[in-house]
Image (tube, helix red, strand yellow):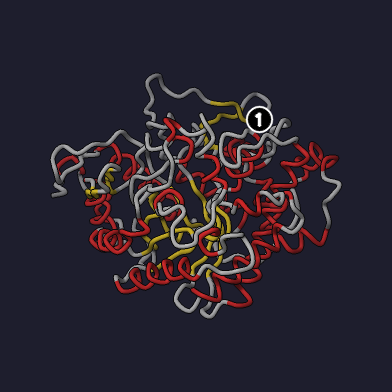
Amino acid sequence: MTFPESFTWGSATSSYQIEGAWDRDGKGPHVWDMMCRWPGKVSEGVTGNIACNHYELFRDDVELMKSMNLKTYRFSISWARLLPSGTGKVNEAGVKFYDELINSLLDAGIEPWITLFHWDYPLALFRCGGWLNPKSSDWFAEYAKLIVDRFSDRVSNWLTLNEPQCFVGLGHDSGTHAPGLKLPLSETLLVAHNSLLAHGKAAQVIRTYAKKKPNIGWAPVGVVSYPAIEQEEHIEAARAEMFDRIDPESPFWNNSWYSDPVVFGHYPEEGLKLFGHHMDWLKDEDLEVIKQPLDFYGANIYNGMPVLAGEDGKAVKADRPQGAPMTLMKWPVEPKSLYWGPRFLYEKYNLPIIITENGISLSDWPSDAETVPDPQRISFTRAYLLELERAIDDGVNIRGYFHWSLMDNFEWAEGDRQRFGLIYVDFNNQKRILKDSAKWYAKVIESNGQTLHEDIITQSYK
């Protein structure tokens, strides 16, 4: 079993989580800048004001990427760094930063993958109604056009939205993420709809104006159910649970509510039965805009839920073994989610799959000035990648894998308590140290996955 020769090996970040320079060189504020000033919303009052200071240290970070053999790097653009008011006048200093980052990546032989939106919505537009405003998708299209005009001579890989389940559900329903709203269901449904319109319009803009042939996708959460026993009845129950079941209280944490409109041009029938009476604003022509041709389906997959077929054939949650491993985020470690998740998504949506995020939060610290041992991250990533390889071997068209994250960073409401990085960051002095997992991952990339089959216990990562 081998990964395809053209397989994309990379790592990923997002702008607010690493850049810092929150008010430097003309950047405008966004909703996470607002959220971090809101007492009690972020653990221990941590902010992304400095984060990893990638804004100043990006050249050093690119050198670290090169030393890790990264073939690709997925990063997001800060909308408010380019357009401080969200629309209108361009901040050329912001453009210059991303120009220099892209050029540094290309000089290092690393292919840039740009995510247009990773949650940092301009505060000026939020104050005009944000995603509730009927103009919001047009604002996003204007922003996308600027990015395409300035960067598509060197960039050909594009993702429109990252995890709408999170910025809609956590940001506008539960209020635990920016902008911290708890809207009525009808309004949160409209937020989701307008963000899908923004995806469609951005995809149109990229397809129309890109100077290089574009490779376009997006990166929703892959909400995975998988069969605890790999027999047909349990497989079918897991598949139905992953796509057909929608929580009657909320449609915001599933696959179909977001992906069916994007790929098929309609909302799932079961969801419309539950929520259609809240959607008096829905227009057929909107769905035509949302449904744009995509080149790949990105999926951010960290875990899954094991299920079994009950007596009626419907899925019931299977018990995990007592003491089953958990990450520092208290997420279950479920390697099979990287087999069944991509497989089910590919079978339903018939698009090439790219794992746009996968990783683990641990409590890492240096054992000496130059070493950060993190054997659990190596064990986690190896187990997940072996399941991904199994999916490829079983015919699933999987074209790439981006490890989350390149470096320890600002982890949203968790502040700096969660370390997902392959690179250790000392937030007091911004020192970077390649963790053992980074050195291990470099060998995986160099071998195109072959070292996954070696005994990791006996390997050295010095």
Q: Position of residue 353 (x, y in %)?
A: 51, 57
Horizontal side of 429 relative to 329 (left or right) equals left
Q: From what the image shows, is residue 375 above or below residue 88?
A: above
Q: Badge 1: how crowded within 10 Å, few (<14), some, or many (20+)? A: few
Q: Residue at x 61, y 37 (%)?
A: 180
The residue indicated by pointer 1 is: 313
Residue 109 image position (x, y, % from top left):
31, 71
Residue at 19 percent of width and 39 percent of height: 366
Quadrant of image for the N terminus:
bottom left
- Of residue 316 and residue 416, the one placed in the foreground of this image is 416
Q: Position of residue 256 (x, y in %)?
A: 66, 46
Answer left or right for 38 relative to 375. right
Residue 236 shows up from this direction: no
Residue at image coords 81%, 62%: 285
Give the residue type that dot 1 points to: Gly
| Quarter where residue 277 is shown | top right
- Residue 217 seen in the figure: yes
Badge 1 marks a residue whose secondary structure is loop
Q: Residue furthest top?
A: 322
- Name the one closer to the observer, 166 or 23: 23
Rendered location of residue 312, percent (x, y) = 68, 26
Residue 111 lies in quadrant: bottom left
Q: Is residue 18 left or right of residue 244?
A: left
Identify the residue shown where x is 45% and y is 52%. Answer: 22
Q: Indicate whether 163 appears above or below 263.
A: above
Q: Is residue 457 left or right of residue 199?
A: left
Tell how many labels. 1
